[in-house]
Amino acid sequence: MVRLALFDIDGTLIQTGGAGMRAFDRVFELEFDIPDAAADINFAGRTDTGILNDFFRAHDLPANAENYRRFFHSYVHWLDHYLTVDKGRTLPGVIRLLRDLLGLTHRPAIGLLTGNIRLGAQIKLRHHRLWNFFETGAFGCEHADRNEIARIAHRRGRKMFGEALHGDEILVIGDTVRDIECAQAIGARCLAVATGGDPLPELRQRSPTWVVTDLSEISAHELCD
């Protein structure tokens, strides 16, 4: 039985219309005087911290506390701005699946497993009226490595339940092979959905527990029984 369901955000729950990438690019230009820096960066399935570390390395900038503060202080402002002007959307089946999970007799706790920093995740999900569905999570501000974020989420789940939480009692839902890898890193079940970073055949090759085109194709009962 699934006791903890952990959702990725971008490409899984929502599409932001490029708001996150545009916010990164704007801050690189304004704070570090480097235009078009995001054009050469792969964002799919990555952590905000990992992306920023790549940027610092590529431009020979120190990855120190002051530069992290400068970046993220400005980033959350621009993220909020671009979410209001870009055409984003909640992806198919998301709200129904979240509501159905909450309606199960033995419902799982619902959390986030995301590369977004916590405030970035909150800004995105509040914009799409999804934030209040989630009661726990692990975020990109806690580690640059997605597999380590999965381990943080697992430990947090154990603490929340106050008892052992086995890997196969956790479900990770995501849209990239990195989501599948981090589920496998903690021995969790995985639902891969082809609404974002990687196409269906590539997701299927990585042997997740389920693969769907979008979240309308699967029910809470199928996932949690």
Image: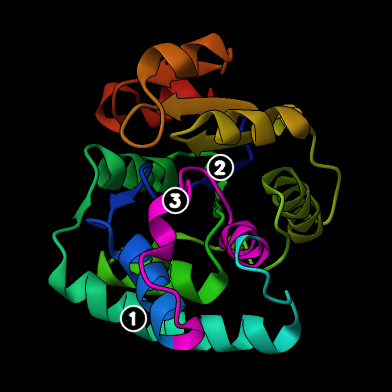
Secondary structure of the residue carrying tag 1 is helix
Figure disc tally: 3
Circle 1 Cα neighbour tier, 10 Å, few/some/many (<14 / 14–19 / ≥20): some
> The residue under label 2 is which amino acid type?
Ala
Q: CA distance from mark 1 to mark 2?
A: 30 Å
Q: Is residue 56 magenta?
A: yes
Number of the front mark, 1 or 3: 3
Q: Amino acid at mark 1?
A: Trp
- The image shows residue 124 at horizontal and vertical percentages of 35, 67
Viewer-nearest of discs 2 and 3 = 3
Mark identifier at residue 157: none
Tell me the quarter of the image containing the N terminus. top right
> Where does residue 154 sit, x and y in percent of width and height?
75, 47
Residue where numbered disc 3 is placed = 40
Between marks 1 and 3, how big is the CA–CA gap? 20 Å
Q: How is the image coloured?
A: rainbow
Residue 144 on the magenta segment = no
Please report contact status of discs 1 and 3: CB closer than 8 Å, yes or no. Answer: no
**Mark 1 or mark 2, earlier in chain:** 2
Q: Nearer the viewer, residue 142 or 224?
A: 142
Secondary structure under the numbered disc 2 in the rendered image:
strand
Judging by the rendered image, the residue that carries numbered circle 2 is 5
- Label 2 environment density (alpha carbons within 10 Å; few <14, some 14–19, many ≥20): many
Q: Earlier in the sequence, mark 1 or mark 3?
A: 3
In terms of image quadrants, where is residue 139?
bottom right
What is the magenta range? 31-57
Looking at the rendered image, the disc whose residue lies closer to the viewer, 1 or 2, is 1
x then y, percent, for residue 111: 55, 54
- Which amino acid lies under the numbered mark 3 shown in the image of this protein? Asp
Residue at 57%, 88% in the rendered image: 70
On the image, numbered disc 1 is attached to which residue?
78
